[in-house]
Amino acid sequence: MCTFVPAYIQKNIIMPKIKTIGVLTSGGDAPGMNAAIRAVTRAAIANGLRVMGIYRGYEGLINDEIKEFRTEDVSGIIGRGGTILKTARSKDFTTVEGREKAYKVMMDRGIDALIVIGGNGSLSGARIFAQEYDIPCIGLPGTIDNDLSGTDLTIGYDTTLNTIMECVDKIRDTANSHQRIFFVEVMGRDAGFLAQNSAIATGAEAAIIPEDSTAADQLEQFIGRGIRKSKSSSIVIVSESPKCGAMYYAERVRKEYPEFDVRVSILGHLQRGGSPSAGDRILASRLGLGAVQALLDGQRNVMIGIRNDEIVYVPFSAAVKSDKPLKRDVLDALSVLSL
Ligand code: F6P
């Protein structure tokens, strides 16, 4: 006779019970990471689990920089930028030996599961680790770049967008006063989300972004549209790029169109700092709760995302694919909005 066994009962039978989870932040810090650490810690404690805070990302895991977190360890941090756990881009964790050390530390400390808050590189690391060792790993999308697939937003993106907007609004004042073209360089690594949407939010005249690099020359397109005489200034948002950043485009304009008064502003790391927006605090809190719930549900090796306001589990392989599409219609709208 065949008896139907609900999935949750099956999980309880086959899943070894998780008692202690480790949480770390890795890669570039992002506003909202603290809210995520707080949510993970409190959700875990509420469910009877122990929480180990792992300092300096995978580097701290390898070197056993670990402290047990109580609920008071995460008090008063929801509004703070950066990460109280510190972060690092660990070279050692990219090696087999490094990951073996990390596993041994986890076993010595009795850590049964790992929650990793970070971007593409950090979740790729978690993916490899989870393939090599029988450790449930859960990822939270923590990066200002918004370049993880399967989630509408990543922790930190909204705050950074607002920071860029405030900066560009100020730059606009001086650009107007001097009737200048400003090339403003923003972060994003290989993704143009920050550039595209900060351009929309600031009423920029153009955005030069990596996703468009195979299309026609973006500078020519901008100049070709003509700069309306009655406009006192132009702002062009440029995605960071080792070769074709804001400096490159400004130099070109200086050479090819000497009649324009051109300046460059590279916003740099100020984009990553500051108190997280309400949106990021809520997103990080929901994702942190979702991560612990996922472990309790027997999930492993997935990133927690939010799509259409619902928590979703995204396999690491899908999350780190780096092909999250920009909305083409939004990009095209820039030329209309800046007429
Ligand atoms: O991934 C986040 C990010 O801020 C990118 O936008 C940027 O390219 C990179 O990190 C900068 O890294 P670092 O702080 O190591 O210079």
Image (cartoon, rainbow, N blue to C red):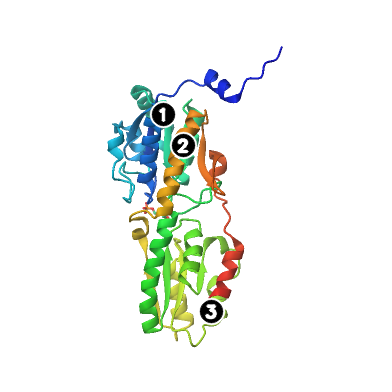
Asked whether 113 or 46 is in front, the reply is 46
Q: Tell me the CA gap for discs 2 and 1.
A: 12 Å
Mark whose residue sits in front, 3 or 1: 1
Q: Tell me if the residue at label 3 has its CB under 8 Å from ligand 1.
A: no
Asked whether 81 or 216 is in front, the reply is 81
Asked whether 337 or 74 is in front, the reply is 74
Q: Secondary structure at mark 1?
A: loop
Closer to the chain start, of discs 2 and 1, is 1
What amino acid is labelled 3 in the image? Ile
Is 204 placed left or right of 83 in the picture? Answer: right
Farthest residue, direction front: 46
Image position, residue 271 (x, y; %): 37, 59
| Residue denoted by label 1 | 47
Is 314 placed left or right of 69 in the picture? Answer: right
| Residue denoted by label 3 | 223
Which residue occupies 41% across, 62% down? 162
Image position, residue 190 (x, y; %): 49, 56
Which residue occupies 49% across, 81% down? 256
What amino acid is labelled 2 in the image? Ala
On the question of residue 68 being in view, the answer is: yes
Q: Give residue 19's quadrant in the image.
A: top left
Which residue occupies 56% across, 52% down? 324
Tell me, for residue 291, which label it has, or none: 2
On the question of residue 91 being in view, the answer is: no
What amino acid is labelled 1 in the image? Asn
Image quarter where the N terminus lies is: top right
Q: Tell me the CA gap for discs 3 and 1.
A: 59 Å
Image position, residue 132 (x, y; %): 49, 28
